[in-house]
Image (spheres, rainbow, N blue to C red):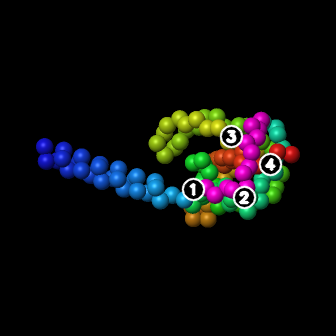
Amino acid sequence: MDARRKLKKLLFINNLWQQGNRNKRKPIDNSSFIPSVLTLKAGDLVRVRSKEEILATLNSEGKLKGCGFMNVMWQYCGTTQKVFKPVTRFVDERNYKIKNARHMVLLEGVMCTGTDFYGNCDRSCFYFWREEWLEKL
């Protein structure tokens, strides 16, 4: 009974801590820049928005609606790319659950080749791009 009580107390404290962190998150301030959703299809040509435009959409954690913008993606700002396909579902490898997605696409040939910390990687994972970060041409 004592172990059960300690576990319950630990879970309660953890829940309070998570709620406190949730309230400290900075809301997205996109009053100066509100991108529209495009509903892109495979084959559409797009321009990746500028760094300033993308930064205006990101919260304090560097995310827009749960999708993070990785540092290696900045190199594509201002470039013209072709949409490979829209993302509607994907496997989240952190917990191996299938997640639904809206207004996200994969760009043709824009893949991860590794990081400075870990080195090269041959897996060739696509980056997820929010439509708000792209401009249809």
In the image, is 16 to the left or to the right of 85?
A: left
Q: Secondary structure at mark 3?
A: strand
Is residue 29 within the magenta segment?
yes
The Cα atoms of the two marked residues, 1 and 4, are separated by: 24 Å
Label at residue 73:
none
What residue type is disc 2 on? Ser
In the image, farthest residue toward the front = 31
Is residue 80 within the magenta segment?
no
Residue at screen point 51% across, 58% down = 25
Q: Which residues lie in the magenta part?
A: 28-41
Q: Residue 68: horizontal and vertical position, in percent? A: 60, 53
Q: Secondary structure at mark 4?
A: strand
Q: Which residue is mark 2?
A: 32
The Cα atoms of the two marked residues, 1 and 2, are separated by: 14 Å
Viewer-side label of 4, 2: 2
Tell me which secondary structure the magenta stretch mostly adopts.
Answer: loop
Residue at screen point 68% across, 42% down = 104
Q: Which residue is mark 1?
A: 27
Q: Which residue is mark 4?
A: 135
